[in-house]
Image: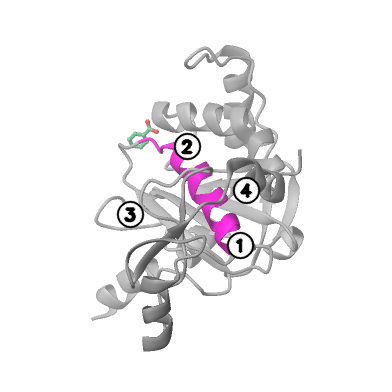
Amino acid sequence: MEIIQEQEKMVSLPRIGDKAPEFKAVTTQGEVNFPHDYQGEWVILFSHPADFTPVCTSEFITFAHLENKFKNANCNLIGLSIDGLYSHIAWLRTIKEKIEFRGMKNIEVKFPLIEDISMEVAKKYGMIQPGESKTKAVRAVFFIDPKGFIRALIYYPLSLGRNFDEIYRALIAMQTADKFSIATPADWYPGDDVIVSPAGSCSVAEERMTNTDGLDCEDWFFCTKKLDKDTVLSDVLKN
Ligand code: BEZ
């Protein structure tokens, strides 16, 4: 019974719509008070299994390469693994000095990397999934909005490197949904049509089928409208 309870504690997952669990931690960029330090901005908190491992190295190079793109979308990055600070520092130095991945080299990881030897943060965020590993964090990605709420989460197993196009796409899609009060359909990218909220009454349903001004309705419950790329990007991107 105790073992089951302990395992459940390890896999307790914060959910979409929850306040991001708070913590203070040591990182490669100094101490962090999470999520308070990021108030007013988006932040992606992500975990990786271990320093000095190849998939994680490819991911760190990619994230660091894209950091400015995320910053332009008002979004900060912060990583975590169950390793100590000196291991983190040594790994990031090695990445900069020695590792090239897909033409990216001399890459300096400037975003903070949390030391979490105690697994305190990893457990709070359900990053330890014992069926996969009891000692290494899975590849979790938490999207946390400017008010400190969890808006999306993606989990990958140890062997699967993340798709950074999707991480960026999801961020821009959520920011666009907030800004324009719309939803985004499957495989949406800026410039594609967006979904207007479903008709909430019979009269609106009728109107959707008769007066489709500015809307493209397949049926009363499925209407899209144009939202051009420049409008989306100029509203969500800083420059
Ligand atoms: C990697 O990052 O290469 C890795 C880490 C843990 C298990 C498998 C692969």
List the residue tagged with mark 3.
134
- Work out which residue is located at the far front of the displayed protein and give it: 210
Identify the main secondary structure in magenta.
Answer: helix
Label disc, if present, on residue 180 of the rendered structure = 1
Nearer to us in this view, 128 or 190: 190
Residue 20, by quadrant, is bottom right
Is residue 74 toward the left or the right of residue 18 in the image?
right
Which numbered disc, 4 or 1, marks the residue that appears first in the sequence? 1
Image quadrant assignment for residue 217? bottom left
| Cα distance between the residues tagged 3 and 1 | 42 Å
First in residue order: circle 1 vs circle 2 = 2
Query: Mark 4 near mark 1, Cβ–Cβ under 8 Å?
Result: yes
Which residues are drawn in magenta? 161-178
- The secondary element bearing badge 1 is classed as helix
Closer to viewer: mark 3 or mark 4: 4
Residue at horizontal 39 percent and vertical 55 percent from the top: 185
Q: Position of residue 95 (x, y in %)?
A: 57, 21
**Badge 2 local density, few (<14 within 10 Å), some, or many (20+)?**
few
The residue under label 2 is 164
Judge from the rendering whether residue 175 lies leftward or rightward of residue 141; answer left or right: right
Q: Is residue 171 magenta?
A: yes
Q: What residue is pinned by disc 4?
A: 232
